[in-house]
Amino acid sequence: MPVGVHGGGGFLHRAAARRPAAVIVGAVAAALGVNLALWLIGLGFDGSFQYVEADGSPHTTTAPQGVITMTVLPMSGGLALAALLAGAGKRRLVLRSAQAVGAGAALATTARTFTAGFDTPSTIALSVMHVVIAVLVVLALEALARRQRAGRAGPVSGNFAPRPGTTVPEPGHGVHRRS
């Protein structure tokens, strides 16, 4: 009977072990899914997602396009930039700094939702969307940072050494290669 090889660590950790682009796409897709669900919940509570213009007239929102655009573009751009800069050297410093800047920017821009004149359900939903982005930016960059630490450790004595808590296939049930 085969035993699982993957012992946990979550989607972002497993994706980071393969390639950074998977982490970025996974984090952005997760944020987009959650934010669209929050938008729908806000609509369910009679949120209009309209803000008041300087002349006092309501601005017609383009939601869900605005939710999609304001989730995907800054998050994917920031994560991609962090991954590229981390590849140029001082990886840990770059990724830790990017965590602070990315989460800080997402949380700082939440203030705008409180001053823009949104109704209460829209304000709450939009604020939580900013928190979702902040959390997923930190998690995605942590997955990339852990990938670096795991890559540095290397195999023990040239042999495969599974992480603590992982399982390996029983003899005779693993992957077989033809010669």
Image: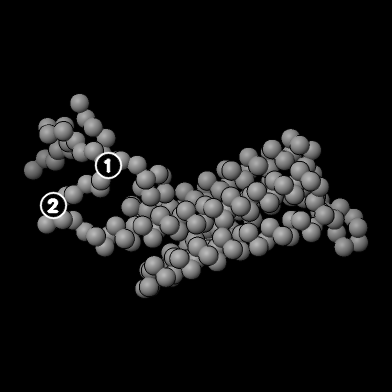
Quick one: quadrant of the C terminus?
A: top left
* x and y, in percent, of residue 176 in the image: 14, 38
Q: In front: 165, or 50? A: 165
* x and y, in percent, of residue 46 in the image: 79, 38
| Badge 1 amino acid | Gly
Is residue 55 placed above or below 165 in the rendered structure?
below
Residue at (45% x, 65% y) in the render: 96
Tell me the element at label 2.
loop
Q: In front: 162, or 176? A: 162
Is residue 6 placed above or below 142 in the rendered structure?
above
Q: Which residue is mark 2?
A: 159
Q: Is residue 164 left or right of residue 118?
A: left
The single residue placed furthest to the left in the displayed view is: 179
Is residue 14 placed above or below 87 in the rendered structure?
above
Tell me the element at label 1.
loop
| Badge 2 amino acid | Asn
Q: Is residue 16 visible?
A: yes
First along the sequence among labels 1 and 2:
2
Q: Is residue 65 visible?
A: no
Instruction: Choose top left, top right, bottom left or bottom right for residue 113.
Output: bottom right
Residue at (44% x, 70% y) in the render: 94
Quick one: quadrant of the N terminus?
A: top left
Q: Which residue is mark 1?
A: 165
Q: Residues within 10 Å of mark 1 (few under 14, many from 20)?
A: few
Q: In front: 69, or 33? A: 33
* x and y, in percent, of residue 111 in the image: 72, 60
Residue at (45% x, 59% y) in the render: 141
* x and y, in percent, of residue 155 in the image: 18, 56
Q: CA distance from mark 1 to mark 2?
A: 18 Å
Q: Is residue 139 left or right of residue 179?
A: right
